[in-house]
Amino acid sequence: MAPGMGRTVALRRREEPLLLFAAGVVLAALALLPLVFLGGELAKGDALRHAARALSAPRTWGLFLSSLGVASTVTILSLAIGLPLGALLGRSDVPLRRVALWLHAFPLFVPPFLLALGWFHLLGRGGLAASGIGARILFSTPGAVLVLALALTPIVTSLVAVGLQAVDPSLEEAALLVARPRRTVARILLPLIRPAIALAALVVFSLAFSELGVPMFLRVAVYPEMVFSRLGGVDYAPGEAFALALPLFAVAVGMLAFERRAAGRRSLAVLGLRSREVPDLRLGRWRPTAIVLAAAAALLPLAPIAALAIGAARGRGFAELPRWIGSSAWNSLFDALVTGTLVLALAIVIGHAAARRRRGAAGLDALAVLAFVTPASVLGVGLIATWNRPSFQAVYGTSAIVVLALAARYGAVGIRTAAVSFSQGSEHDEEAAAIAGARFLRRLGLILVPIHARGLAAAWLLAVVFCLRDLETAVLLYPAGQEPLTVRIFTLEANGPEAVVAALSCIQVAMTAVVLALGSALLFRRKR
Amino acid sequence: MSAAIQLEGVTVLRGGRTVLADVSLRVPAGETLSVLGSSGSGKTTLLRVVAGLVTPQLGAVRIGEALASESGRIVLAPEEREIAMVFQDLALWPHLTVRGNLAFGLDARKVPRAERDARVAAMLSRVGLTGQERRHPGELSGGERQRVAIARALVLEPRAVLLDEPLSNLDVGLKQELLELFRELLRERGTTALYVTHDPREAQALAGRAAVLDGGRIVHVGPLEGLRGRPDLPFARSVVESLGS
């Protein structure tokens, strides 16, 4: 064999590790580099003096603890509501439970501050159900906790419902033969999906801890806002922002450790290959109560969205839209679609490697999770430190910086979804293709991607929707004149016409609904 | 002798396909009846109908004297039938220990703690698993898991036990050993059993009678030898060949 040909064969044999390496380099550039540059900034000039000053202020730690308290309370509340609701909407004999789950889960894809805005249109001054006490509660820490808990509970509900539906039917049936449904859920099903519950708790905590829009709108001081305010406005002090990001990063590392211990690979585990349908769990005499609860779960989260629509219609906000919307909706859509596609490319390679336990994949998965649980303000500060240079203006001065940031932050969403899909398929499919002589790229293109098309489409759709709902990442980095719709609403919210802000919010909701509807139609299309 | 399990004209339809067609069967108390049939013949569905996990569209199921299912509705819920089942994949709960797996059903039936512990210990001793109480299913060998599964079913002292191909995928030596254990346990307790298998030798080793399913219909009930006179049935031919002359 000619030497050149030998090299080609060797390269082909190494297609899989080389591709994984390339994906790893891209992920590291997106998620690791900003954190490294963030550390580098602290070593510059008098940055350490700034850091010492910022971190020694009593207000810093007071706010830090209070933010931890808010995020913890939101997580506990979400678990308390989402666990029973997930069981109810996932596996019980409540009529129309799938519709109820969809309606309940929808606000998850809407930026939480929009829901806060909706609650304001409902309970605030001049609202549809205005009262002094309602407004006072809303504009307080408990109010922020409640708004966030209602916005984020669908994460727990959905993961619990999906987890329960994935439990091997025979494990459930073996319990149903000897125990009532309630005991079966409490003692068998919920413990079996513990990794999914841990993952849900982690996602809720990290999103609540990172949240900027809801506390700022409800005038509740939180730690991430301190970092945000140092990057713009009267408090501009980037050196301090770098320092203040450090405790947030420490929390992110703690969350990653929790995720590795409590969920990690097990959240990808196929709890059982569902080979047949199991009858719904019978609620017996509790069914009427459960139906009321399910209806409340479906309708309550939609109340603020309805209030926004009514507010917009009443104040002729929709008529004013063309004057105010600019290109923000298109910017949102463009950023989300490009990011979703980039995330999908990474997810196919890294998700497959994680599902098949390839060497290095666990590290890349952990890096993606770290970027997801790292508060957006930290990642944003790191990205500014990395890309805000004259030679990188083609990136920093354009939408590319938003795409990079969103891909870093939501890469884990796509990678995990793809990994779950690959985990659920038989490894024999690709082994048979390998035995038949197909190299990795060929196996990927002709076997794996077609077989897992739905799972991969779901990974893309989730990444797109998470990008559409993002405010925290984009608000730090958007280039002038190219702000996405969430940022447009957020900036107008302070001093723009109320009805117009409500109308813009409705556009954001409608845009998400259309993307979800189109994506779902594609996903749930009957297989030929 | 009174029937422990009785099916009267049971029909199960799924997706426009008839899975069980007008099945009638009577299993007297204390008898072990094998259910034989090729893949897709409806064997597992038959067990699930008896357990109350599948509702027959037509016909009735009686457990003892009680009506358990009737034309499209479950009268007795699965947990009220006092039936135990050993699943093909065993369905041992991975998050519970061996002891936890056995105690779960007793706890659900509110058996007092002292009695529960005594019954679990006695059953584990009977199946040769004393000392393994604290281990999880994932830490056991294939044979040990089979023993836990049968112990979990019998510790409840059920009215009847349903076994869904519990010995498939085991090597011949282990299969023989466990078959012997099943036979002893069922005989000494006088437990009624429905034993689903596709292996005629297993069926003959465990039960005097067998019900043969073909395309969702019962085509034979009685000793397997009786199939020698049914050359019209393709499955019967393979059974006769397996049994030898």
Image (cartoon, helix red, strand yellow):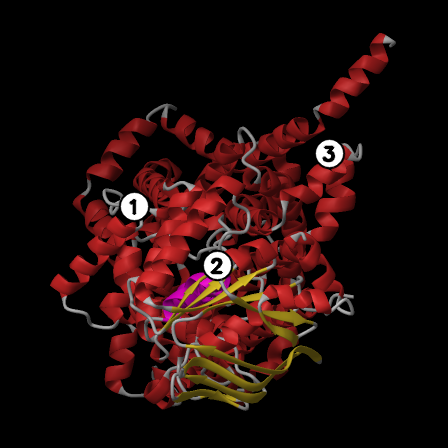
User: Circle 3 — which element?
Assistant: helix
Q: For the point 51% across and 31% down, which residue is it? A: A33
Considering depth in this image, is A377 or B69 the residue closer to the camera? B69
Mark positioned earlier in the residue sequence (1 or 2): 1
* Tags 1 and 2 on a common chain: yes
Q: Quadrant of residue A186?
A: bottom left
Q: For the point 35% across and 51% down, which residue is it? A: A224
Residues shaded magenta: A153-177
The chain ID associated with circle 2 is: B
The answer to if B241 sits in the magenta stretch is no
Counting from the top left corner in percent of width and height, residue A125 is at 34, 84
Q: CA distance from mark 2 to mark 3?
A: 50 Å
Which residue matches tag 3? A440
Q: Which mark is residue B128?
A: 1
Counting from the top left corner in percent of width and height, residue A37 is at 46, 30
Which residue matches tag 2? B206
Considering depth in this image, is B70 or A255 the residue closer to the camera? B70
Left or right, B46 with reference to A372: right
Q: How many marks?
A: 3
Left or right, A474 with reference to A241: right
Q: Quadrant of the N terminus of chain A?
A: top right
